Image (spheres, grey):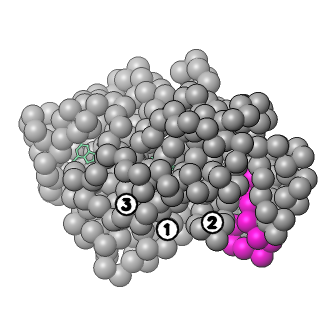
Amino acid sequence: MERYDAIVIGVGAMGSAAVYHLARRGARTLGLEQFDIPHDRGSSHGVNRIIRLAYWEHPSYVPLLRRAYELWRELEHVAGERLLVVTGSIDAGPEGCRTVQGSLRSCELHHLPHETLAADELHRRYPGYRLPREMVAVYQPDGGFVLSERAIVAHVTAAQALGAQVRAREGVLGWEPAADGVRVRTSRGTYAADRLVLTAGPWTARLLPALARTAVPERQVLIWAQPLRPDHFRLGAFPVFNMEAPEGRFYGFPIYGIPGFKFGKYHHRQEQVDPDRVDREIHPEDEDVLREGIRRYFPDADGPTMAMTTCLFTNTPDEHFILDVHPGLPQVCVAAGFSGHGYKFASVVGEIMADLATAGESRMDLGLFRIARFAAAG
Ligand SMILES: Cc1cc2nc3c(=O)[nH]c(=O)nc-3n(C[C@H](O)[C@H](O)[C@H](O)COP(=O)(O)OP(=O)(O)OC[C@H]3O[C@@H](n4cnc5c(N)ncnc54)[C@H](O)[C@@H]3O)c2cc1C
């Protein structure tokens, strides 16, 4: 039986970064992926993901984000390609809402440069935005996006150059603790390792059934719409955004990679799903939800559809991540439950998982991300 220092199950956003950081520490590492690398059946496809520093969700994320930015820049250097594009970011909504107040709080606590703009001033600077007068926007210049599939390729390529083994189309059927670490059984064989890192995204509960109610997959749908006024949505003219509206929370990007304005709604139609049986067809109701938001807030982008795709969130009850050592098994670490906002952190999550697996601790404050906060998962 082949033996490794560490096995990583799931080579998507978090797993590819974990394999890389383990290999950087000199650990003999095996990454196992059930599909291709990259693929479009998990959570990380669709060209790019927003990265933003003014984190409305909780100020505790800001130190992780600062490290994530550093590591994305390092990875660009190693890969020799651009992976992080800075556009500035907008957090918008009614003045007192959680998004605007949370974003301002993170800016103030962490001394982030920012400006608060009224809706008409936002439109004057970035004409693609046509938000109603009762909304305000927090502009933070460091926001932008990470090229999500390219970054998975970059992490895997860099890990392989350091000697890591990565195997695609080799699904893990089961794992078990052993006296000297773990055993992992796949569609092709059985492996042994001292440490196990679980980064299985929407399939997490298949490998850790105790998380069945704590890491819940949800179907999402994205659209790329050809703008009627492309100049307003080109790179350089349009910051990425997060917006709290009466209809829900929308997000979007300037044109990049696909010839359209990329737009989505968090929790789309609130459909909890089985990741192996999710409906990947796009239905008229899916487009209606997105078109309603585009017409109301970005009418100059309401042109023909260029592309649409489905994708999966994995939600925890409080929408904060799980980054921890397994409560009963010190040889097992878990990165899961990214609740629709995890990609931007993948670089630092890889480093955290490597720290937890090799040293049992991280220099980052992981207090918000403990498994034990969910009684059912302990
Ligand atoms: C539509 C959409 C928009 C988003 N927008 C943003 C955004 O703008 N900014 C942001 O930061 N985040 C965003 N997110 C969230 C972010 O993309 C996810 O948090 C992140 O991609 C999760 O990464 P992951 O590694 O957990 O999952 P994945 O990248 O899906 O990786 C998990 C991998 O594990 C593999 N796997 C599972 N089980 C097994 C097994 N038994 N054997 C072998 N392999 C296995 C899977 O095949 C998969 O490749 C968005 C998500 C979606 C769906």
Q: Which of 237 and 11 is in front in this view?
A: 237
Q: In which quarter of the image is the C terminus?
A: bottom left
Name the foreground residue: 186 vs 104: 104
Q: What residue type is labelled 3?
A: Glu
Q: What residue type is labelled 1?
A: Glu
Q: Is residue 56 above or below residue 189?
A: below
User: How far across and down, in percent of the image, does residue 199 sit?
Assistant: 35, 49
Marks 1 and 3, how far apart at CA: 12 Å
Q: Which amino acid, mark 2?
A: Glu
Residue for point 13% across, 48% down: 173
Task: Look at the image and give the residue range highlighted in magenta.
Answer: 90-99
Say if disc 2 is inside 8 Å of ligand 1: no
**For this view, does 342 lie left or right of residue 302?**
left
Find residue 15 and report its horizontal and vertical position in percent.
38, 42
* Vertical placement of residue 377 versus 215, above or below: below
- Mark 1 and mark 2 residues within 8 Å of each other at the beta carbon: yes
- Mark nearer the viewer, 3 or 2: 3
Mark 1 = which residue? 319
Q: Mark 2 points at which residue?
A: 57
Q: Name the residue under label 3.
A: 218
Q: Which of 166 and 3 is in front in this view?
A: 166
Q: Position of residue 325 (x, y in %)?
A: 37, 61
**Can residue 154 be seen here?**
yes
Q: In this view, does 226 lie above or below 57?
A: above
**In magenta stretch: residue 356:** no
Which residue shows up at 58% across the image and 57% down it? Answer: 292
Which is nearer the N-term, disc 1 or disc 3?
Answer: 3
Q: Do the residues labelled 3 and 2 touch (CB within 8 Å)?
A: no
Q: Which of marks 1 and 2 is nearer the N terminus?
A: 2
